[in-house]
Image: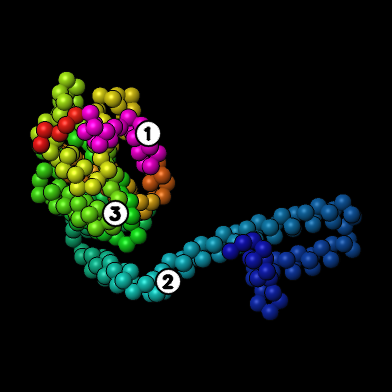
Amino acid sequence: MSLPLALRSLTWRNPTPVATVTMLSLSLILVASFVLPLAGLTGLIGLLVSGILGLSLALWRRLTQQASTLSTLETPFRLASDFEMFVRYEQLAAALLTISMQPDVIYRAVALEHLDDLVRQARLVAQGTFVFEGTETWRLVYERLLRSPGLHRYRSVAWIRTPDYWQDEPGRKSLAVNFELVEAQRLRIERIVIIDDPLWPVQETWPVEPVRQWLHEQFVRGIDLRYVRMSELTHEADLLVDCGLYGSRALGVQQLDEQGQTERFTLVFDLQAVLDAEARWSRLAIYAESWKSYLDRYEFPG
């Protein structure tokens, strides 16, 4: 509520504190005009106007606080139009009521700590960020995104630091989804592979197995494949990220453990984050060579 709106509440039928003070001030000025000189009258008017403005500001602050409280009370009514969200609101509210009735002080302390974690997670979700722990949970979300309507291009950066990268069952299943969608012409997949130098020494024609077959299979199955050695990115450390761009919809960043398996997968639904990742992709593409052009120079051993 703005200050002018607060001032409009001055009515004779239902006077507010500001209205009452204003009416008394006008009466006082009227009486004083008969007994005070002009200078004294001017000073009195200034004093009264300052008082009225101060009172109006205090009233406006109080009304603003009340409006904030009313907004909180309106939350269930606003959520009522979204049935799925409202059901979860009711479940959370019921759980909070149950927790609040527990008298044990240790229980309450631990409960509040867990609830603080939930609040932090909820704020992340509200910002469009989801964090998944473990490989299988990541794979399911990954597949849902790739199959989602309206997605026509997927750009991936695969940072290979171990020979068994994506060689586990979830990795093979994810790659199978890639092949299926490309062969059905439902999705264009572009992948730049960053290879740690020990996995493809400069003096060697081909990378170590099973990396070599892993790369070639993707090319044969229709994925637009490019590669770059890590040593070529020495001065471009920010490009060393294992990630996926799901059109302009979302960015996924994968963190791997020492065995090359997914430790954490962060999914961000934020256009600016996607645009920043697209800019990094364009920079990375400058260093990368296509697998096709490499095969034009060297015959694949089979």
Q: Earlier in the sequence, mark 1 or mark 3?
A: 3
Depth check, mark 3 against mark 2: the one in front is 3
Residue 182 at what x, y percent from top left? 24, 53
The residue tagged 1 is 283
Relative to 140, is 73 on the left or the right? right
Q: Earlier in the sequence, mark 3 or mark 2?
A: 2
Crowd rating for badge 1 (residues with CA inside 10 Å; few <14, some 14–19, many 20+): few
Crowd rating for badge 3 (residues with CA inside 10 Å; few <14, some 14–19, many 20+): many
Q: Amino acid at mark 1?
A: Arg
Query: Residue 187, which numbered label?
Result: 3
| Front-most of residues 198 and 15 | 198
Q: Is residue 185 visible to us here?
A: yes
Residue 300 at what x, y percent from top left? 15, 34
Query: Residue 98, which numbered label?
Result: none
Task: Examine the rendered structure and indicate whether residue 114 appears above or below residue 24.
Answer: above
Task: Examine the rendered structure and indicate whether residue 257 appears above or below residue 120.
Answer: above
Residue in the picture at 47% in, 69% down: 70
Residue in the picture at 37% in, 33% down: 283
The residue tagged 2 is 78
Task: Examine the rendered structure and indicate whether residue 116 appears above or below residue 149.
Answer: above
What colour scheme governs how the chains and residues are painted in the rendered image of this protein? Answer: rainbow
In the image, residue 289 lies in the stretch drawn in magenta: yes
Q: Amino acid at mark 2?
A: Arg
State the residue lying farthest toward the top.
203
Q: Earlier in the sequence, mark 2 or mark 1?
A: 2
**Distance in Å between CA atoms under marks 1 and 3:** 23 Å
Where does the magenta region start and end? 277-297
Residue in the picture at 29% in, 60% down: 148
The secondary structure that most of the magenta stretch takes on is helix
Q: Is residue 113 visible to us here?
A: no
Task: Please tell me whether mark 3 sits on a helix, a strand or a loop.
Answer: loop
